[in-house]
Image: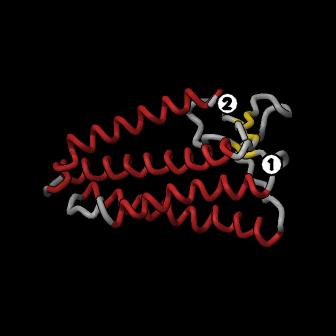
Amino acid sequence: MGPFWKFAARDAIVLAVVAALWFWFAPFSNGVGLRSDLVGVVLGVGFGIGVFLLHEWGHLLGALATGSRVHPPDRLGSGYLFSFDSGANSRRQFLIMSFSGFVVTGLAVWCALGPLDLPLLAARVARGAIAFLASLTLFIEFPLVLYSLVASSLPPVETFPPRARGEGAVDGPA
């Protein structure tokens, strides 16, 4: 896990806060009025942020499990969890990293169609956030996988420029 422990702590706190707020306040989004609307939107968007974080962790865990070289971001507030070093990794590592994030998104879609099928505004907003994130996966990430399969090479997927070659890079255990 190396340099990712602080991101794991950050994301665990975010997920715990969203879960606690959902548990305590989601029923308030079932009403009519400004309070219900505000609670529903805030909780639904928070749920979507949680799904995004889990999706990114799915990618990272898949990358680390295959021994991929990845670069952590420089700052804790980064929107990205890691950068995949397409120059140092194989197509197999790229595909496993990609599909591990897709699995998390698939579970989120299942959740949206099952356990989140509630009459609450918070649940409807969360389902919308999941649909939005799944569409981003479909239209942005999936074409990169198709490119890799058709071209038999890796697309350039670094999300931010790596530091000096090797500095801060993490290789998974595989």
- The residue where tag 1 is placed is 89
Quarter of the image that includes the N terminus: top right
Front position in the image: 67 or 19: 67
Between circles 1 and 2, the one closer to the viewer is 1
The residues tagged by marks 1 and 2 sit, at their Cα atoms, a distance apart of 21 Å
Residue at image coords 41%, 36%: 14
Residue at image coords 55%, 32%: 7
- The residue where tag 2 is placed is 74
In the displayed structure, does residue 35 sit left or right of residue 2? left
Residue at image coords 78%, 57%: 91
Q: Secondary structure at mark 2?
A: loop
In the displayed structure, does residue 80 sit left or right of residue 47? right
- Tell me, what colour scheme is on the image? secondary structure
In the displayed structure, does residue 58 sit left or right of residue 154? left
Mark 1 vs 2, N-terminal side: 2
Q: Secondary structure at mark 1?
A: loop
Residue at image coords 31%, 64%: 114
- Give how far across and how far down residue 2 sits, in percent: 65, 27
